[in-house]
Image (tube, rainbow, N blue to C red):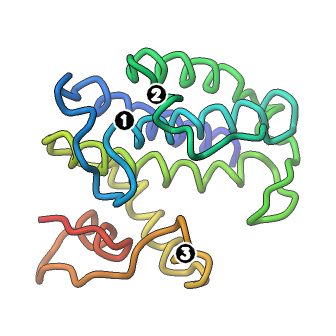
Amino acid sequence: MADDTREKYQRAADGFDAVIRAVPADTWEAQSPCTEWQARDVAGHIIGIQEMVLGWATTGERPSLDWTKNRDRAGSDPVAAWTQARDKTLAALTPEALERKVQSGLMGEVPLAQLLQLFIGDMVIHSWDLAQATGQQVRLDPQIVNELFAATKAAPPDMLRSAGGFGPELPAPEGADEQTRLLAFLGRTAS
């Protein structure tokens, strides 16, 4: 499980990397599908996720992060901040780190590899959010989309749709592909 999870985490990071590197310089302040965030905030959130995962991977402890500081975390060069955070995190995701039990508020004490499933989904969905904010088309990893859709449909609605989670489910267009159906399920309008 740990090797497969590490590989999926890498693929999700690669997908986000492709989007963030293609952001036009004049669109960092563009509104994202996340109502409280502009493009820079989305980048800062994913950078913060890397910092959190790095903490779990290296010390077994979740670092205390101020989630109102996403914009500061991204800074004036979100691509450089992302690259540094991603590289450190991926290097720390060793087989030993992935097997380490860590404390999670949502899942209790679990192996880091199990907890990473949440952050794989987060990176994939926010890849789409960043792409939308900055005028890019993105095709998300189909295997991750499939697994994420199954997991989110099975999640307790109060956990999935709580404050800071996903918005209410929207109708997907008739005949929509799985990516579009997933996005609609998570409250995003995709054409």
Which of discs 3 and 2 lies nearer the camera? The answer is 2
Residue picked out by circle 3:
160
Residue picked out by circle 1:
40
On the rendered structure, is 72 left or right of 95? left
* Residue 74 tag number: 2
Q: Are there few (<14), some (14-19), or many (20+) residues within 10 Å of tag 3?
A: some
What element does badge 2 sit on?
Answer: helix
Mark 3 residue type? Leu
Residue at (62% x, 76% y) in the render:
159
On the rendered structure, is 117 left or right of 26? right
Marks 3 and 2, the one that precedes in the sequence: 2
What element does badge 3 sit on?
Answer: helix
Residue at (28% x, 68% y) in the render:
188
Spatial separation of the CA atoms under disc 3 and disc 2: 26 Å
Residue placed most toward the observer, 77 or 100: 77
Mark 1 residue type? Arg
Picture quarter with the C terminus? bottom left
**Above or below, comparing residue 102 to residue 147 in the picture:** above
Mark 2 residue type? Ala
* Image quadrant assignment for residue 180: bottom left
Label 3 close to label 1 by CB (< 8 Å): no
Q: Are there few (<14), some (14-19), or many (20+) residues within 10 Å of tag 2?
A: many
Residue at (47% x, 73% y) in the render:
150
- Where residue 24 appears, x then y in whole percent? 17, 26
Marks 3 and 1, the one that precedes in the sequence: 1
Spatial separation of the CA atoms under disc 3 and disc 1: 24 Å
